[in-house]
Image (cartoon, rainbow, N blue to C red):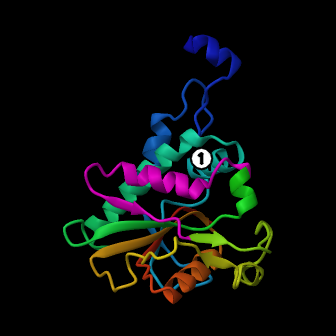
Amino acid sequence: MQSLLDLVLPRECGGCEAAGTLWCGRCEDALRRPPVAIRPRCDPGVPCWALGTYSGPRRTAVLALKERNRHDVAAPLGRALAYAIEQLRMLGEIDPVELASLALIPAPSRRRAARARGGDPVERFSRAAASTFGTEHVTVSPLLRMGRGVRDSVGLGAAQRQENVAGKILVSMPKNTVPYSATDASDTTVLLVDDVLTTGATVSESICVLKHFGIRVDGVLVVAAV
C-alpha cells in the first residue's frame, strides 16, 4: 500500500527533498545543533538565539511548512527547538527545569496567511517542541495576533518592517483570565518563538506589547536568522 501511495504522492524529505522519506537522518543531524546567539538590527532588548542561518534544511523545512502545507515538518522543527532549549539550559543561558517552568509564546502571523496554511505554522512547531519534553509541563500560549493593515514583509527594509508592525500586534486572551507572568512569575522562563528572524521588527514589537500587559519575555528563539 505504501509503495502504491509513493507512486501517486512521492515522499520526499522536508529538509533536503531527498526521495523516499518525509525527513532524513542527515537533516535531523543538521538541525540538532547548539543555538547561536544573534543580534538583530531592531534590538528587542532580550537575548536572541537561532538554530542557524536561513539556509540548507532550515530554509527548506520552513518553506515546506509555510508554503507547501507540509505539516509533518513541524515535528522535526519542534525536536530541534527542544534540543536548543536543553542546550541553553545546560549553558546557563536560561534557568534549568529545577528552577523554572517553561512557557513558549509563538510570534504572530497574519490571519490570512495562517488560514491559507491550514493554521499558524509557528504555533504548530511550538506545540511539537513542547510535546518532546515528556513529563515536563511546557506551556504554549498563542497570545499574540496581527491586527489589520499588516502586509507581507518580504522585500521591506528594517525601517519599513518596523513601521509595518508598529501598533498592529495585539494581545488576545480569554476574558477574566490572568496571564501566568502578570504577577512577576520568576519561576517561569518565557521564550518568544518564531520561524525566521530578519530584522527583529516583529519580535521587538511583540515583546513591547507583552511587556505592556505585564508579561516578561526572557529570550527569543528562532529556527533561522537571515
Q: Quadrant of residue 146?
A: bottom right
Percent position (x, y) of residue 83? 36, 54
Answer with left or right where residue 44 lies relative to residue 202: left
The part of the chain drawn in magenta is 116-143
Where does residue 68 sit, x and y in percent of width and height? 70, 42
Residue at the farthest left position? 98
How many marks the image carries: the answer is 1
- Label 1, on which residue? 61
Question: Outermost residue toward the front?
Answer: 176
156 lies above or below 224: below
Residue at screen point 77% across, 73% down: 148
- The residue tagged with tag 1: helix, strand or loop? helix
In this rendering, the answer to whether 172 lies above or below 109 is: below
Q: Where does the C terminus fall, quadrant-wise?
A: bottom right
As displayed, is residue 182 above or below residue 7? below
Residue 199 in the magenta stretch? The answer is no
Pick the residue in front: 143 or 207: 143
Q: Residue at x 44, y 65 (%)?
A: 104
Dot 1, how many residues are within 10 Å of its Cα: few (below 14), some (14-19), or many (20+)? many
Say which amino acid is labelled 1: Ala
Res 93 seen here? no
Q: Quadrant of residue 17?
A: top right
